[in-house]
Image (tube, grey):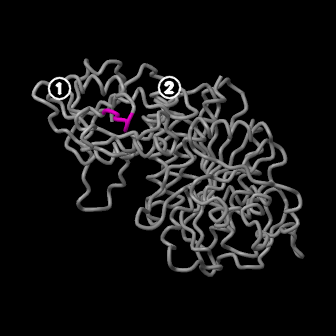
Amino acid sequence: MNTALFDRLSAVQADLVVTLVPTEAALPQSTSWVDENTAGLISQLRESKVFSGKLAETLLLPVASQDYAQAVLLVGIGKDETLSDASARKVMAAVAAKAKSLPYASIAFAGAELAIAGHSQAQALSLTSQWLHEGFYQFTGFKQDDQALTIESILFEGTDQGALDVGVATAAGSAVARRLGDLPGNVCTPSYLASKAQTLGEDYGIDVELVDESRMSELGMDCLLSVGRGSDQPSYLIVMSYKGGDEGDAPYVMLGKGITFDTGGISLKPGPGMDEMKYDMCGAASVFGTMKAICELKPKVNFTAVVAAAENMPNGNASKPGDIVKTMSGQTVEILNTDAEGRLVLCDALTYIERFEPKSVIDVATLTGACVVALGGVNSAMYTNNEALHDDLRGASKVSADKVWPMPLDDEYQQQLDSNFADIANIGGKEAGSVTAACFLSRFTKSYPWAHLDIAGTAWTGGAKKGASGRPVALLTQYLLSKAN
C-alpha cells in the first residue's frame, strides 16, 4: 500500500476523501473547504442532526455534489477539541472499517487538525497513519472466500515525512506480529519462525543465526531444551542482528518468548480456550515485528532480536512436575508446574545474551495469567532492574500510546521461589504470580540493564473478536528510535 503526504486538499485527486466533523466546534480547515465546495452540505447535515459528528460516527457521501464529484467520508470526532489516545484510535478504526468495505483504490485522509492529548502534531501524524494502516489488517490465506483489499494508496494531510514513515513502518511491524500470532500452531512452528528469520535476513541484509538443539545442548541450555522435549518439533534459539549503528557498538537486545503452542505439558491446560495458546508466541512475534519496523526505518542503532522458540507438548519424553534441570547459568530449577514453561526458555536465553554485552535487554512474553487478572487488556506489565530503562520505556510508551504499567520486584517476593531440592522453583504459589515470574527471570539478568514486559493481557483478544493485537511493537520501535544516534 503506497503512502504520501499532501498539504492542500484542493490539489488532491483521490477516490475517497475523509474529513473530520466535530459535534459543536468550527469545522477543520479541510472539512470547511469541502463544505464550501458542496454548497454547505456538511453544515446542513450537522445542523439537521442527520450527521451530528459523534465520536467515530461515519457517513458516506458517494457524490458530494454536482460541482464536487469526489466521494466523501465524514467521520465524527465528538465534542472535545483534543482527543485521548483511545478516542483517536476509535476514530481511525471507524475510518478503516468503513473504507475497507468500499470499492475505492485511493484515499485522502484530511486529518492534520486531529489533536491528540499529550502528542505533538508530528506524533499525531505518526499515530493516525499507524492506526489507519492497522485497521486494514486482514488475516488471509485460510478461507476460500478471502477478499483482497481494493485500497492501493493512502494520502495523509501533513508535511512531516519522517513522522509518516514511523507510523507506516510501525504498522508494517504490527502486521507481521499479528500475522505470526494468528497463524495456527500446525503452521507456525519453531522451524517456521526460524525460516521467517532467514527471510528477513535475505530481504534486509541482517545477520541471522539459528542455534539448534545440538548446539544448545553443548552450551548447557538444558532448561530451554526441557520445554520442547515432549514435542516432535525441534526447538530453536533464533538471533537476528541489525547493525545500523557504529561498528563495535554494543547492541540493544530484545528477547521474545516463542512457545508456538502451549498445551501446558504434563500440567495440562483445560480444554476450553486452549486454541488460543497459539498466541503464546506473541512475545516472539512482537520482536519479529519490531525488527521489520527497524529494517524499514533504518535508524542508526545496533539492535539484536532473540527468539526462544519451542512447542510445549505432553508425550513420553516431556518434563514432569518435580523434575530438576540445570540452566546455562549453572543454577538448577525444580519444575513444579510444566505450564510455567515460558520462564524456562527465557532464563537460558537471558544467559546466552550476556555474550553481546548489551546496552539493555527487554524480554517480551505472554508469561502469566496473573498479569491478566492484575491489569486486564489495557496495560502491559513492566518489571525492571534499572531506573533509567524504566524511564525510557515509560517515555516510549507515552509517545507510542502503547501503555505499560510499572510493577514491583521487591526481594521479599523472591522467597516464594525457594525449593527444598534445587536452587530455584519455577513457580511461587498463587500470590503475586506475575511478580514471582519476573523475580525468577531477574536471577538471570545481573550483568545488564533489563526489563521484562508481561503481555499476557495485551497481546491478543479472545472471544468473538479473537485476534492478535500487534502489541507492543509500537512501544519497542519507539524505544529503539529514541536510542538512535
Q: At numbered mark 1, what does the secondary structure look like: helix, strand or loop?
A: loop
Q: 285 or 401: nearer the eye?
A: 401
Mark 1 residue crowding within 10 angstroms, few (<14) / some (14–19) / many (20+):
some
218 above or below 318? above
Q: CA distance from mark 2 to mark 1?
A: 30 Å
- Looking at the rendered structure, the kind of residue marked 2 is Gln
Give the magenta range: 19-24
Q: Residue 148 or 199: which is nearer the viewer?
A: 148
Residue 63 or residue 255, whichever sits in front: 63
Q: What label does residue 39 carry, if any?
A: 1
Residue at numbered disc 2: 121
Instruction: Name the secondary structure under disc 2.
Output: helix
* Quadrant (top left/top right/bottom left/bottom right) for the C terminus: top right
Residue type (three-letter) at the residue carrying disc 1: Ala
Going from the N terminus, do you reach mark 2 or mark 1 first? 1
Q: Where's residue 93, x and y in %?
A: 39, 46
Identify the residue shown where x is 45% and y is 22%.
161
Q: Nearer the viewer, residue 358 or 3?
A: 3
